[in-house]
Image (cartoon, rainbow, N blue to C red):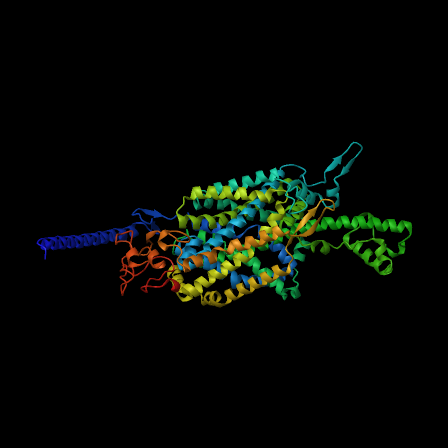
Amino acid sequence: MPKNSKVVKRELDDEVIESVKDLLSNEDSSDDAFKKSELMVDDQEEKDVDVEEGSDVEDERPAWNSKLQYILAQVGFSVGLGNVWRFPYLCQKNGGGAYLVPYLILLLIIGIPLFFLELAVGQRIRRGSIGVWNYISPKLGGIGFASCVVCFFVALYYNVIIGWSLFYFSQSFQHPLPWDQCPLVKNTSHTFVEPECEKSSATTYYWYREALNISSSLSESGGLNWKMTICLLAAWVMVCLAMIKGIQSSGKIMYFSSLFPYVVLLCFLIRGLLLNGSVDGIRHMFTPKLEIMLEPKVWREAATQVFFALGLGFGGVIAFSSYNKRDNNCHFDAVLVSFINFFTSVLATLVVFAVLGFKANIINEKCVIQNSEKILKLLKIGNLSQDMIPHHINFSSITAEDYNLVYDIIQKVKEEEFDSLGLKSCQIEDELNKAVQGTGLAFIAFTEAMTHFPASPFWSVMFFLMLVNLGLGSMFGTIEGIITPIVDTFKIRKEILTVICCLVAFFIGLIFVQRSGNYFVTMFDDYSATLPLLIVVILENIAVTRIYGIDKFMEDLKDMLGFSPSQYYYYMWKYVSPLVLLCLLVASIVQMGLSPPGYNAWIEDTAMEEFHSYPTWGMIVCISLMVLAILPVPIVFMVRRCNLIDDSSGSLASVSYKRGRIIKEPVNLEGDNTSLIHGKSPSEVPSPNFGKNIYRKQTGSPTLDTAPNGRYGIGYLMADMPDMPESDL
């Protein structure tokens, strides 16, 4: 043995003793820090505090100023343009009042349960869509990325619709309204009505030619429409300014953007009910056609409308609920918002058909006058006998009922030569049966009806301002579904990310303000969201009920809400909702396969719409939209499955969760579960310092040391099983 070996051994022993002392002193300081944190819980009531990862400085997650602000945000997101121009069309098309029956049934089966599920996971884990699903299982982190991609695609074209509404809003401050009459064209010899307008109508011409200046096909871009480009820029500036501070800025705007549409709808309903013919429209609307209700197509369209009306799968619902307190009653919120959405749709339907009934009545009166003049001419030339006309009929002031009586008599007497007379039946139901939806309802049918209103500019201003607010409310939730997950995951400053996102979206959105832009809006609306969102929500349901475990989830809800949710939700989430969603997915794929992919092009010469199939490159774009939207799911799964990215690197789908989260419950310290989630080895677990570790042994230990409150972290992770493999989460 060398001479100095004992000296070396003594020095090593001294170092070991010093290390033990350091460890004990660290443990003592950790205990002191914990006691201090325990006092902090008592001092700061009802605050959920997050401590930034790698930092001992506490950082509060933004929170809603009030429950009302949060409810208005969720209502503003779910109640959108579809409630005004899609639901009334489906209601009329699919059996009138009978359509409400399948809609309500499906609202209870898939709408409320899945909406409740998204609210609960967002509130429990307090992260955006990427963080939530990555937290349950890193292999499913792609679900959140897919939601972000779909949100981005939808935001691209949805804001274009807000731009169109802004254009019409700006043009409404004049009397008469610019779409009231067809324009006159002057040449050297005479003045005549614009042929394209004469063949269609004033409002149709204004929409296609003055507003969109539309080209005749998708391939003919025609250059930028500068009026719409400016309106699109204005729309993105509004969204950017409202979202730049997150819910602190957008939450305040919700008080106006969410409530103002209801004021307008109520004003329109009261005004509409005072108009001649409005009752005919409402009666036609809600007359049930029970035989139609049994058709599978009705149920498929009702399920699709329920699905999209509540904004399921977009990530906006999860993002908004992530700013809630942990003990918020999200079950009440889910039921309340769902039924507010439903009754808003019914209110909008009443308004739309009261106004369309008035419009149909005016058109029917014109039809009666024109055909009465034809009958007088036929009487004069002797084609009809005066004896056929009842004595009480006065053609100078004939009513619709009297005309229909004369029409029926002539049809019976002149049965063989009736068609050659050129008379029309002039039934108000025929006009009401001409179902219109989307832009055709808002920018053509409704605008035409408003031209007949007294003080029409006022009502036009109110209507398009309502559309702008409905669109903005949905845009706030859509953008929040992009911004919140990325900020939570990659720790980017929200202000910078919001500006970059809006700038990129504006420049990509220029394709929608070309002269062919309306066709691209149709393409994105048909293909960018429907199938990807259905797949996303099916995976969300599977992630919670199968991978995490429905029983654990129900326990989490009991812990979070303070009461056990009804077993109804257990069976809906586990069995019924996934089955219904799967059937809806299959039906949507079949419907997409049976329907020829194409769009309705406006032909200037005929002043009519004509169906065109997509060119080859257009089909490639359609398929690419669907593939790109769902591609993150398999990519993230394979990356995690093959361990291509180190979980500790904070790379793809790796969420850096804030540590040391303190909640309202007494002595309730919840810490970082990242090491448990990603299966870190004991050597990777940080040293036991307060704010950087929770009170537990390494994952290799046979038992877990519990924190004073007996909890292990936040969200769905139940760290009561040591060495839980990733696949078991």
Q: How many dots with numbers?
A: 0
Q: Say whether residue 163 is left or right of residue 397.
A: left
Q: Say whether residue 405 is left or right of residue 660.
A: right
Q: Nearer the viewer, residue 580 or 133?
A: 133
Which residue is situated farthest in the left direction here? 3
Q: Say whether residue 683 is left or right of residue 416.
A: left
Vertical side of 37 occupied by 705: above or below:
below
Provide residue 517's location: percent of width, then percent of height. Answer: 61, 45
Q: Nearer the viewer, residue 446 or 546?
A: 546
Vertical side of 563 occupied by 395: above or below:
above
Which residue is situated farthest in the front direction here? 2
Q: Is residue 706 visible?
A: yes
Provide residue 66's location: percent of width, then percent of height. Answer: 42, 49
**On the rendered image, what quadrant is the C terminus found in?**
bottom left
Provide residue 631's location: percent of width, then percent of height. Answer: 50, 55
Vertical side of 605 occupied by 580: above or below:
below
**On the rendered image, what quadrant is the N terminus found in?**
bottom left
Q: Is residue 100 visible?
A: no
Which residue is situated farthest in the right direction here? 382
The residue at 60%/48% (across/down) is: 520
Vertical side of 208 occupied by 410: above or below:
below
Q: Say whether residue 702 is left or right of residue 95.
A: left
